[in-house]
Amino acid sequence: MLKHSGEGEVLHERHAVTVTTFSGVYSGMLTPMRSENAHRNLLAAIEGRAGVEFFTATAYDKASGAPCACFDIAVDAASGDGCGIYRTVILEAGVNGPFDIATPAIWCQCEGPDEVVRKVYKHLVDMEFFQNLYWYIDNAIPRHVH
């Protein structure tokens, strides 16, 4: 896998290729989602809860406007609990098929799904997840081939 230096460069064994520095993410409109389309990390987090609603929203890169991932959200309106994951698909040279990469579910109190997206995103920014994305992919997030 190519490594990101954190300074806007991808480091390759033979030569460095300059890429744009990660500029942040914004999300599109949340749409309802059926539970069978939710990521396994989200389903595991809400196991045993009844009446949970699922939503998804595409995440876009702020600088280019290109879609880069999605937020999958579960909201338990009765308790005011919500949880969400940041999910993306990556391709790796020499591997057959893309990897589905998702953060563990992040829980919060919420008034609705939009608030869950904001809180999940803020949590990821605060922990410098996006600046260290390739470290998390290599060391902390399980990979699942589609």
Image (tube, rainbow, N blue to C red):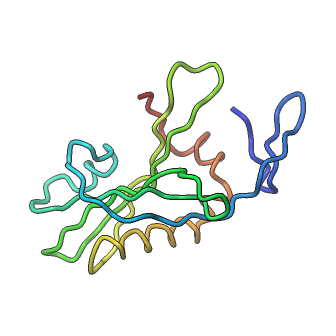
> Outermost residue toward the bottom?
111
Tell me which corner region of the image, top left, top right, bottom left or bottom right, holds residue 110: bottom left
Can you say whether 108 is above or below 130 in the image?
below
Figure quadrant of the N terminus: top right
- Residue depicted at x 51% and y 30%: 98
> Outermost residue toward the right?
15
Can you say whether 142 is above or below 5 in the image?
above
How far from the left and from the top, in percent, is residue 104? 41, 53
Query: Which of the pair 103/112 is nearer the observer?
Result: 112
Tell me which corner region of the image, top left, top right, bottom left or bottom right, holds residue 85: bottom left
> Outermost residue toward the front?
65
Figure quadrant of the C terminus: top left
How far from the left and from the top, in percent, is residue 97? 50, 23
How far from the left and from the top, in percent, is residue 49? 14, 59
Query: Which of the pair 32/77 is nearer the observer?
Result: 32
- Residue depicted at x 24% and y 53%: 33
Can you say whether 142 is above or below 111 in the image?
above
How far from the left and from the top, in percent, is residue 64? 65, 58
Q: How many marks?
A: 0
Asked if residue 89 lies left or right of residue 107, the reply is: right
- Residue depicted at x 25% and y 72%: 81
Asked if residue 8 lies left or right of residue 83, the reply is: right
Asked if residue 121 lies left or right of residue 74, the reply is: right
Query: Which of the pair 86/55 is nearer the observer?
Result: 55
Asked if residue 138 lies left or right of residue 21, the reply is: left
Tell me which corner region of the image, top left, top right, bottom left or bottom right, holds residue 31: bottom left
Can you say whether 61 is above or below 109 in the image?
above
- Residue depicted at x 21% and y 77%: 80
